[in-house]
Amino acid sequence: MALKNSYLIDLMKTVESRNPNDKQFLITVRSVLESIEPVVEARPELIEKGVLEMFVEPERVIKFRVPWVDDAGKVHVNRGYRVQSNSAIGPYKGGLRLHPSVTEDIVKFLAFEQTLKNSLTTLPIGGGKGGSDFDPKGKSDMEVMRFCQSFMTELYRHIGPDTDVPAGDIGVGGREIGYLYGQYKRLTGDYCGVLTGKGLTFGGSLARTEATGYGLCYFTEEMLNAAGKSFKGTTVVISGSGNVAIYANEKATQLGAKVVAMSDSNGYIYDPDGIDLACVKQIKEVKRGRIKEYVDSHPNATYTEGCSGIWSVKCDIALPCATQNEISLESANTLIANGCWCVSEGANMPTVMDGIEAFQKAGVLFGPAKAANAGGVATSALEMSQNSQRLSWTFDEVDAKLKQIMVGIYHNVADAAKKYGCEGNFEAGANIAGFLKVADAMLAQGVV
Ligand code: NDP
């Protein structure tokens, strides 16, 4: 698909000239503008009032030095980021990522996507994202703590329970959120819901850990049901073995699927008997080990070095849950050739644009990330509500709300796609439905 509307073509040229080095951000903005073209044509006031120009420019990009000292006394300096993309519908909300691949481009693209995703949840949260090129892998707990304290020593002045509420993402789980929260409290003296994904003893929500993976499966099951199918009796491949992948496996299995492969950034395991999730949890959540250790206790399983090979494993449903661009066009074609008929994204932007087009051409049911993985941030917003109320809801209460939100997202996305002439294209439907709410709020608030 290419942009046809002359106003949007010019707008895209401006975005390109302003962000010449931000490849991933440009890909994302272009893809969203392509999807919302019919909305822009039907709503000329969006052009007249400058809503699009404001929408493609983050409200704020914060970049800072993060110095810390390792266990041997050596000083290291990393870079920290927080991109506050859009606050039209609520305080900025979005995760913090700790991974060597983190750059301003990556954080900016994730914050832009987050704005649309958060809008889809129906909850009052704007879009933001942050992180650092620090690699927590192989670091001691004390090193991670010193890094987190240094990171928060700058970040704290830009966030707050009613301004910006960060959460976890790749490399940021319960341990990191705990250290970040401790330092925020020490610097400000405030005991408030400034971060989500907190431990249950200090304001965390039950079901937040499970939320993204479970939510992915609730969304996917609804999409499958609408097509007269379900998870029951299917063979599923899930990339990654982190937070999203583990709980996607748990829920898909509860819904009757057999998950046969999982991975980490070194390679993938294939177990024809179905992955033993308790073993994966022990390796990844308890020991912080590598996925290849799985085959030591499962003789029928095999380990293959290199993570992209996982897409050659035959399956009905693929749930990419590791990272961006992990399904190349080649991997997409391999999945299609092997009979895969549904792909639903747990990670953010795991499929390259050509891959998405290949799935759509082949009639593969495709659940786009910003809709399918919105369960994590939705439950984070439920954590914010509980913190404001000074109450804790039960696991079942939170899980029921999560399910209701994910089912609602599917229908909102499917209806928007139909209304704007692209029925069945949930990628376009998610962009349109997410954008409409943000655009209406921006219109109402004027030039700000
Ligand atoms: P984790 O850090 O818990 O797990 C990430 C997993 O992906 C690990 O198994 C990791 O392997 C693997 N991985 C990381 N980089 C690569 C790579 N370049 N190639 C292959 N595998 C890789 O992160 P999450 O599970 O939290 O996040 C996974 C994805 O889901 C991300 O895209 C994130 O943005 C998205 N997401 C997460 C949400 C959440 O609530 N956590 C909410 C919505 C989206 P290794 O152990 O080797 O690093």
Image (tube, rainbow, N blue to C red):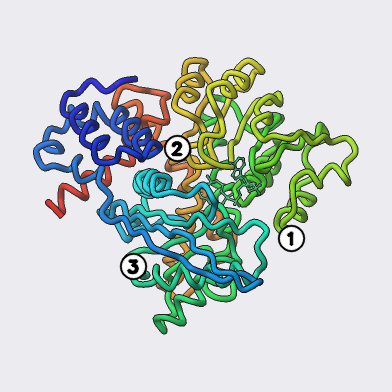
Residue at position x 70%, y 57% in the image: 285
Establish if 119 lies above or below 420: below
In the image: residue 7, left or right of residue 357: left
Ligand 1 is within 8 Å of the C-beta of the residue at disc 3: no
Q: Position of residue 251 (x, y in %)?
A: 65, 45
Could you say which disc has been placed on residue 286 in the image?
Answer: 1
Foreground residue, 111 or 80? 80
Mark 3 residue element: helix
Whether residue 229 is visible to the viewer of this picture, yes or no, is yes
Q: Amino acid at mark 3?
A: His
Establish if 318 lies above or below 291: above
In the image: residue 108, left or right of residue 203: left
Contact? badges 2 and 1 (CB < 8 Å) = no
Give the residue pinned by disc 3: 158
Label 2 vs label 1: CA separation?
Answer: 34 Å
Nearest to N terminus: mark 3 or mark 2: 3
Whether residue 392 is visible to the viewer of this picture, yes or no, is no
